[in-house]
Amino acid sequence: MYQAAFMFRPGSTDADFEAFTAQINACANRLDGFLGEENWQSPDGSLRLAIYYWADRACLDVFVRDPIHRKAKARQAEWYNGYHVIVSKVVSTYGDGKLPHPTGDSRRERRA
């Protein structure tokens, strides 16, 4: 499993931004290996984080190469006041089972 964390400082958005966002989300949701996403925002709204979870690197790579995603990335300077992406391999996930999460619970799944 992989996660792609996209941290950014929001800038000005427009109708193109909204359209790209909807198309990119639709693309992710169409891919069999897309597991889900989480979003976080700092209390003052100056920093945001979107984390996308993928079953494997191959599926993440399909998403990265999507033409709409690539076009949006090329225009990032119009909409963000800075960004940073972190792609990580997820080696373990767990919890008490009371908080649903896109990654599941690898320790419980190994026992089953």
Image (cartoon, rainbow, N blue to C red):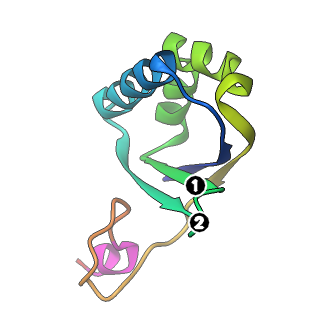
Instruction: Identify the element where label 1 is drawn.
Output: strand
Q: CA distance from mark 2 to mark 1?
A: 9 Å
Q: Amino acid at mark 1?
A: Leu
Q: Which residue is mark 1?
A: 49
Q: Could you tell which of marks 2 and 1 lies nearer the N-terminus?
A: 2
In the rendered image, which quarter contains the C terminus? Answer: bottom left
Residue mark closest to the camera, 2 vs 1 = 2
Q: Residue 73's spot in the image, x, y percent?
A: 65, 22
- Residue at coordinates 50% horizontally, 61% vertically from top-left? 40
Picture disc at residue 42: 2
> Magenta includes 107?
yes
Taking 53 as reference, is 43 left or right?
right
Q: Residue 91's spot in the image, x, y percent?
A: 55, 66
Picture disc at residue 25: none
For the record, the magenta segment spans 105-111
- Residue at coordinates 54% horizontally, 20% vertically from top-left? 69
- Identify whether 96 is placed above or below 31: below
- Identify whether 30 is placed above or below 95: above
Q: Residue 96's spot in the image, x, y percent?
A: 31, 89
